[in-house]
Image (spheres, rainbow, N blue to C red):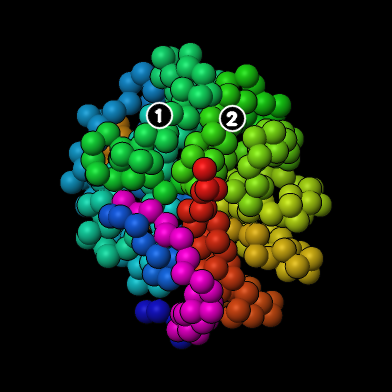
Amino acid sequence: MIRASYFILVVLFIAFVSCRPEPPDIMTVTGPVSIKKMGKTLHHEHILVDFIGADSTGYHRWNRDEVVKKVLPYLLEARDLGYKTIMECTPAFLGRDPVLLKMLSEKTGMYFVTNTGLYSAYEGKYIPEELQKKTAEELAAIWIDEARNGIEGTGVYPGFIKIAVERGPLSELNRKVVEAACIAHKATGLVIMSHTGPALPALQQLEILKEYGVDPSAFIWTHANNEKDWEKLLEAARMGVFIAFDGFKPDKVDEYLDFILYMKKHGQLPQVLLSHDAGWYSPGQPDGGDFRGYSDIETYLIPAMEKAGIAQFDLFQLFFRAPADAFRIRELPVQ
């Protein structure tokens, strides 16, 4: 049953989009969609993730019909809680499956957004050896081609660039992947979402963005909840970076609530993104292993926020406006 306050959020969202110029689209697995239609959004979730490694993964590792059977009830639950759009953050060579996402979109009526890019954390385990040898320009060309011509002949286009770096100083491979993301962003307008964690690699990535002339607002600092010095998160938010607390579980209510209140106090709530990093159908495990649904924020965090005095407009900001602002396709400069 959808909470009564959800309808207030819908009214706020309609007011938000009606007073803006016609916005750029987001790209879903079923085609471009205006941010007016995004609705309530979870910005970082997964359907299927395959950690076997780039040399062994592939579509042969799972049966799409079996995955749909397992995952569909969890998605319908999220839909019935009012969520309309899910950003699916599984990158290539880790279980990205555009066809599976399109099947789920058609069965739920929800929007799913997939990605291009590479996951260069864990010393390149999830990048094929031949791609590790390519230059940043060559990697970017692959991602630009997916954005312009679709992924692997599926007719599905990516809606953002997903990369990942180590938690410490950037390795040579990390730097190359970040540089490739900058090049691809400037050619496509797709936002860069980077699995990052602590501040050190985040700030190093922002320096690379600066070298390439990429605005910080085109960068999502993913897993920022792993950085405990919130002043560093605040500094990045003031630059325009989107700060993603995207590992919510019920035992993290107090931590997430304190952070939300901290960012609201400093006027940076528009740069905050919240999600579960949940799902995770695991190929090779019986029935896909333990699958975690997408309802904990609605069940635990939002009531705690309301009890703490967080207004409906702030909820609208977090689950409607911020994802729309973060994932809108940027307009490319006139050549």
Other residues around mark 2 within 10 Å, as few (<14) / some (14–19) / many (≥20)? many
Can residue 64 be seen in this snapshot?
yes
Looking at the image, residue 151 lies above or below residue 102: above
Of 210 and 279, the residue lying toward us: 210
Other residues around mark 1 within 10 Å, as few (<14) / some (14–19) / many (≥20)? some
Looking at the image, residue 278 lies above or below residue 211: below
Q: Mark 2 highlights which residue?
A: 179
In magenta segment, residue 15: yes
Can residue 9 be seen in this snapshot?
no
Q: Could you say which disc has been placed on residue 24 in the image? A: none
Of 62 and 232, the residue lying toward us: 232
Circle 2 SS class: helix
The magenta segment is 6-29
Circle 1 SS class: helix
Q: CA separation, marks 1 and 2? A: 13 Å
Determine the image quadrant of residue 82. Answer: bottom left
Q: Residue at x 66, y 77 (%)?
A: 310
Residue 135 on image: x %, y %: 51, 19
Q: Mark 1 highlights which residue?
A: 142
Residue 35 on image: x %, y %: 44, 66
Q: Amino acid at mark 1?
A: Ile
Residue 13 on image: x %, y %: 50, 77
